[in-house]
Amino acid sequence: MHINDLPVPDVYDLPDARGRFGEYGGIYVAETLMAALDELKQEYARAKADKAFMDEYRYELKHYVGRPSPIYHAKRWSEVLGGAQIYLKREDLNHTGAHKINNTIGQALLARRMGKKRVIAETGAGQHGVASATVAARYGMECVVYMGAEDVQRQAANVYRMKLMGATVVPVTSGSRTLKDALNEAMRDWVTNVDHTFYILGTAAGPHPYPMLVRDFQAVIGEESKVQMVEMAGRQPDVVVACVGGGSNAIGMFYPYIQVPGVRMIGVEAGGDGVETGRHAAPLSAGRPGVLHGNRTYLMQDAHGQIIETHSISAGLDYPGVGPEHSYLKDMGRVEYTAANDDEALAAFHELCRTEGIIPALESSHALAYAKRLAPTLPRDQIILVNLSGRGDKDIPTVAKLSGIEL
Amino acid sequence: MARIQTVFSRLKSQQKQALIPYITAGDPHPAATVGLMHALVAGGADIVELGVPFSDPMADGPVIQKASERALAHGVSLTSVLDMVRDFRRRDTETPVVLMGYANPVEAMGYEVFAKAASEAGVDGVLTVDLPPEEAAALSDTLKAHGLDPIFLLAPTTPDWRVAEVAKHAAGYVYYVSLKGVTGAATLDIDSVASKLAHLRGQLSLPIGVGFGIRDAASAQAVARIADSVIIGSRLVQEVEEHGADAAVRLTAFLREVRSAMDAARQ
Ligand SMILES: Cc1ncc(COP(=O)(O)O)c(C=O)c1O
């Protein structure tokens, strides 16, 4: 797409009062949860307008998470690729190793404000589970994390990390035993314990107000980037790239750029074995709109509206839905969505390790894979900013196994 | 008159309450469902709730989740559920059938196509668990245009202003969820249900059914004393899980026991 054709909106004030991003989003849950979501919406509106709340959130990001995360010019890798300059937003340097904690701090502070002493979370790779267990320990709350039984096996180190911080990890054996089923189970817990429990949802999906509040808490990524890019390069990037699972790191990066002219944005989904094989986790690239987990959005589903199993090398992208704001931005054309398959992500993972001494998360490696594809096609004075959403320590066993190495 | 309304006015004149059993369509296999539905009616069911299996039954406990998984393993879809209802109607033209399920299969089929097909198959009401009134206007209107009743849930957490919202869209009856939890959860607190129902009666003219946590004749009788109908699900699905297609006689016997306990409630 030519830069001048980018549909940059003059006004962007979404979601609306019903939690809608155009036709996407909304509140599709059983009646029992409606009152709790309403309460959350009201309390969040008050918190956002409360200087003391926002000051504490920013204080925690600075002193507990270590923000602002730096932007790093990956000169050697850019040189190898022989085209545009690649800059990395280093969310991997955050406490707990990913962007997830930006959101869990915000939601835990909300939970405390609402007097809820028990928090629950769903997790796939375990990053959001770890970030939730971390803040629960930090604020003295009980924490229960739901995790697909498959993922408990695949991500043993993260399970132990959560336990070290006092969380209870519940393996979920229903359905496909992965992230979507963990989300179902967390919702079931919430329905049952709604009076005293706060659900810390880990991505920019779910029923309103979650997609909005997760976006707002993650928007610090893009807000910092806007300032840092000017400091480092004297201008904003030409292209911004982020991986998309449920879409929280991507929307956190994209949201502050939506109304900035001349900035192309690209969300990269998990292509698995290849989008053409059907074995992937790329609803925006190859799905259809439908209703799941409380919102209307693009989904991976069969002809009868049953949700189908996803495939990805990265557990954090292994999700059949996507945050509703991405569905809106896709239809509007402001953000382009594409996919990188397992092999490409793995190749980018290794390349960043060797050329820059940075071990990226497999999720983030999908964004890197796209940058690797794009950079050589652009002139050397162009800038690609990649959101490096997390570090790859958690993925070392997976990568070693793929290389035939027993650790 | 619509079948559901007919049932409630007949029962009212008899001072009885409706017995509404639930089973998941296609569990344990698609060929068994119609027989099980007739078995429910033989046991005294006034209305049959038929669960449409979904891959992500967020509001259901383990018993109904597993029933859904068994049905889906046989390739059961919304289309095949409608075929089952059509088949049921060959022998039973009176007992109302209510489909209970999640939004996405209906979204995938399309509201208009679904409402027309459901009406032709002999469905009477549709309860879409994850479509609260805020999101349900379009589907409710389409259902009503085809003579189908949109059934809505009310919960212990529902504030008055939302009851008014539900009242705007609902028809047939409303389904009061007796507890905060998923289907198949622990037993209900009859006193709190009674006081909530008394409050709801002031705001709603539709009959009120109570479900979640009713597992035996005693709890059914207690609910029959305060509600217009008794809805039993997980307990029956468990029977199907344990005895497969052979559950038919057991379902009939169990419902007979429940039915007589309910009918004794007002004597
Ligand atoms: C490092 C990292 N990046 C990305 C994701 C994907 O989530 P989201 O799309 O919400 O950013 C995850 C999820 O676990 C993650 O751990």
Image (spheres, helix red, strand yellow):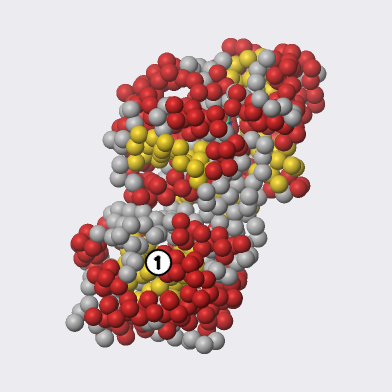
Please tell me which residue lies in front, B210 or A340. Answer: B210
Q: Is residue A23 above or below residue A50?
A: below
Taking the spot 59% from the left edge, 72% from the top edge, the residue there is B30
Q: Residues within 10 Å of mark 1 (few under 14, many from 20)?
A: many
Please tell me which residue lies in front, B15 or B63. Answer: B63
Answer with the quarter of the image where residue A73 lies.
top right
Q: Is residue A111 above or below residue B114?
A: above
Ligand 1 is found in which quarter of the picture? top right
Taking the spot 71% from the left edge, 20% from the top edge, the residue there is A352
* Amino acid beneath label 1: Arg
Taking the spot 53% from the left edge, 27% from the top edge, the residue there is A99
Q: Is residue A121 visible?
A: yes
Answer with the quarter of the image where residue B175 lies.
bottom left
User: Label 1 lies in what chain?
Assistant: B
Residue A355: x percent and y percent? 73, 15
Which residue is under mark 1? B235
Quadrant of the frame with the N terminus of chain B: bottom left
Residue A2: x percent and y percent? 73, 33
Please tell me which residue lies in front, A142 or A170. Answer: A170
Please tell me which residue lies in front, A121 or A33. Answer: A121
Taking the spot 44% from the left edge, 53% from the top edge, the residue there is A29
Residue A318: x percent and y percent? 61, 41
Residue B8 is left or right of residue A256, and the answer is left
